[in-house]
């Protein structure tokens, strides 16, 4: 020890302050801050205590506990629920695959997804559909996630393959859940029976997957050298951004059918999805445009000098840099799209919030239990939103390698 | 035309090139010929049009009047001609302009793979050879942001060389570098010049010009004020403006 202090060349960084010093420095460095610390501490303890007491003694959780399946899938025919189970299992496998390849980014998603099965498997109420067998099957999904994780160790399962499988499974799950008249294989479940978290996620995931490429194209169009394309894209973006989402949903839901030729009927849920998509696309476009503007022109020049075509310059050099720069605002946009799905209840789409409302209205005994139901829904939204923002932060740091 | 005659034809012909930015005339009639294997240095005060001129040679800037013929192809609005010429001319920029989201190796292989349509493996083999030549094979899997300025500029030279160009254009390649890194880039350029590459170099590195240039052009105000061999320019400049400029940069 003494040798270190004797040699002047080897200096150690100052020791981090101990807990006591930290508390004194940060919480009690003046009489006013000391008072503030105490007052806030009292307030926090009081708030947490009242919340916990309310949750465990005062609150009546029956309208939440009694209808887990309703919150999940709405009026989806109970005899067809195996399809939902199948889709969930497919996703379990893919999540297992993705977990190994994109560990840090996926961790919260894996946790949330696994947590969902655990919560439902141990749902603390007696639900006729949730038999012991079904509960076991739900827990088995944890095993499927693990199998996916182990399988993805094989080198043949590349990130590209996983991405393609995800897109394919999203498409496949739509066919599974809706049914197909093809050969009469699967009964059709009309979308007016869809509901709950399922519809919320359908609108959110559908809206995100469709609005992202659409938004990127709009952003590129707005920077196009062709005036017609530029003007059309600009008008489109500015019009959509100038209108509240709810009015776009109304427009699509009520007015659009009047313009469609007779005989063509667009499903109510699909109309809502279209509305959400174009709304989100306009905002995504503006975010992406910011990213495009942040890529120095020298990049384009260097690529031109090497003989790259305009398409290659966009796809290989400008867009990858632009998109990386705008991950935070785009994820922010997607989170707000996710929460905005609740507005679809305004055009008679039974998403999670609408299911909560209908549960409250179903029995006189539930009058006055809004706190419980809406609180529960808020927590569900919070968990999923937090998951997205956490994943985005991890994604940024993963992609941040080699940032200048 | 016999092959020998084709060889004697200049690989770059610029005839009476004019260029405007709005109302400002940047080039007021530049005429220059560069033969295969020659090294030409262009120097002059900032705003003299030297960068603009070198950028018209691969049409990063469009010229408005006059004629530019590179490797027998005239530069015009024909996009296919432009792409052909860009495949034959490599360019190195003052600010390197490496692609920050790609590794050094990917920076060097991107154009051979996508423009020349080579197999990835072949492109990578060649890229490693070239990185060896510019002296940084051990950096192949790093990102540009992790390299020093001198290393980045050498990667930029490697990236241009990977397309196996007939002509290399250098637009102030050492102006953004710290003094101790200038030499490592100049060494690569000197080696390239000695290997017989046709080079057009905009630079104020007079040591480089004296050592390897076949001809020098002094630009001022959009015109070629004076041209000649380095010996003539340094020892016997004819124009007052050339004398003044040389005395200023050599004093530094």
Image: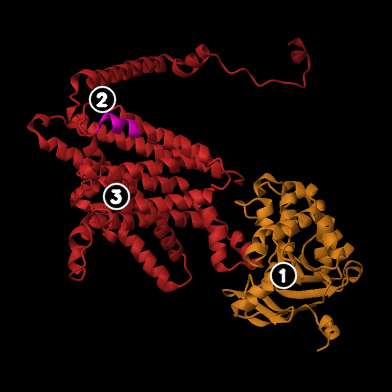
- Circle 2 packing at 10 Å, graded few (<14), some (14-19), many (20+), is few
Tell me if residue A229 comes above or below residue A23 in the rendering: below
Q: Main secondary structure of the magenta part?
A: helix
Left or right: where A258 falls relative to A39: left
Left or right: where B98 falls relative to A151: right
Image: magenta residue range: A130-138
Percent x, y of residue B123: 70, 60
Q: Which color has been applied to chain B in this rendered view?
A: orange
Q: Is residue A71 visible?
A: yes
Rounded to the nearest whole Å, what is the CA distance between mark 2 and mark 1?
Answer: 72 Å
- Judging depth in this view, the residue of A201 and B210 nearest the camera is A201
Image point (60%, 80%), residue name: B78
Query: Which residue does the numbered mark 2 point to in the structure image?
Result: A124
Q: Is residue B63 visible?
A: no
Q: Nearer the viewer, mark 1 or mark 3?
A: 3
Q: Which mark is residue A177?
A: 3
């Amino acid at each position: 020890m003494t040798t270190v202090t004797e040699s002047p060349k080897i200096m150690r960084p100052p020791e981090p302050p101990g807990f006591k010093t930290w508390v004194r420095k940060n919480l009690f460095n003046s009489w006013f801050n000391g008072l503030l610390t105490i007052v806030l501490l009292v307030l926090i303890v009081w708030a947490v205590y009242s919340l916990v007491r309310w949750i465990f003694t005062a609150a009546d959780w029956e309208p939440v506990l009694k209808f887990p399946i309703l919150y999940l899938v709405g009026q989806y025919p109970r005899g067809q629920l195996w399809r939902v189970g199948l889709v969930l299992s497919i996703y379990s496998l893919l999540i297992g695959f993705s977990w190994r390849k994109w560990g840090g980014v996926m961790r919260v998603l894996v946790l949330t997804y696994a947590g969902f099965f655990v919560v439902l498997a141990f749902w603390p109420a007696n639900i006729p559909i949730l038999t012991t067998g079904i509960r076991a099957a739900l827990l088995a999904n944890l095993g499927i996630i693990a199998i996916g994780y182990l399988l993805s160790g094989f080198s043949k399962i590349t990130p590209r393959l996983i991405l393609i499988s995800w897109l394919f499974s999203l498409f496949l799950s739509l066919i599974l859940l809706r049914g197909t008249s093809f050969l009469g294989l699967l009964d059709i479940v009309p979308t007016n029976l869809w509901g709950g978290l399922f519809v919320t996620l359908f609108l959110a995931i559908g809206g995100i997957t469709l609005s992202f490429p659409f938004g990127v194209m709009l952003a590129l169009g707005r920077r196009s050298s062709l005036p017609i394309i530029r003007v059309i894209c600009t008008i489109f973006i500015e019009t959509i951004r100038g209108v509240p989402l709810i009015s776009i949903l109304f427009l699509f839901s009520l007015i659009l059918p009047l313009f469609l030729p007779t005989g063509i009927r667009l499903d109510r849920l699909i109309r809502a999805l279209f509305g959400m998509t174009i709304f989100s696309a306009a905002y995504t476009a503006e975010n992406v445009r910011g990213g495009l503007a942040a890529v120095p022109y020298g990049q384009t020049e260097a690529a031109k000098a090497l003989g790259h075509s305009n398409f290659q310059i966009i796809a290989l050099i400008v867009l990858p840099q632009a998109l990386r720069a705008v991950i935070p605002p785009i994820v922010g946009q997607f989170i707000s799209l996710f929460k905005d799905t609740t507005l679809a209840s305004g055009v008679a789409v039974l998403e999670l919030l609408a299911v909560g409302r209908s549960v409250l209205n179903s029995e006189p005994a539930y009058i006055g239990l809004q706190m419980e139901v809406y609180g529960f829904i808020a927590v569900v939204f919070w968990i999923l939103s937090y998951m997205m923002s956490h994943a985005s932060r991890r994604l940024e740091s993963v992609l941040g390698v080699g940032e200048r | 035309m016999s092959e020998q005659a084709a060889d004697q034809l200049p690989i770059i012909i610029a005839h009476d090139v004019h260029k405007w930015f709005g109302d400002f005339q940047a080039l007021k009639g530049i005429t220059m010929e560069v033969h295969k294997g020659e090294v030409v240095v262009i120097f002059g005060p900032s705003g003299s049009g030297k960068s603009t001129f070198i950028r018209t040679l691969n049409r990063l800037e469009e010229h408005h009047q006059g004629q530019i013929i590179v490797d027998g192809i005239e530069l015009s609005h024909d996009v296919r001609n432009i792409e052909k010429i860009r495949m034959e001319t490599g360019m190195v920029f003052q600010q390197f302009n490496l692609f920050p989201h790609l590794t050094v190796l990917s920076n060097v292989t991107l154009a051979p793979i996508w423009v020349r349509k080579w197999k990835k493996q072949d492109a990578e083999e060649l890229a490693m050879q070239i990185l060896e030549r510019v002296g940084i094979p051990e950096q192949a899997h790093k990102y540009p942001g992790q390299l020093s300025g001198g290393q980045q500029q050498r990667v930029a030279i490697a990236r241009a060389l990977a397309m196996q160009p007939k002509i290399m254009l250098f637009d102030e390649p050492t102006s953004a570098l710290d003094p101790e890194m200038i030499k490592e880039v100049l060494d690569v350029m000197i080696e390239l010049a000695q290997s017989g590459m046709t080079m057009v170099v905009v630079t104020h590195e007079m040591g480089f010009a004296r050592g390897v240039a076949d001809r020098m052009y002094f630009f001022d105000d959009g015109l070629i004020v004076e041209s000649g061999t380095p010996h003539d320019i340094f020892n016997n400049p004819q124009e007052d403006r050339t004398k003044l400029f040389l005395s200023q940069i050599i004093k530094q």
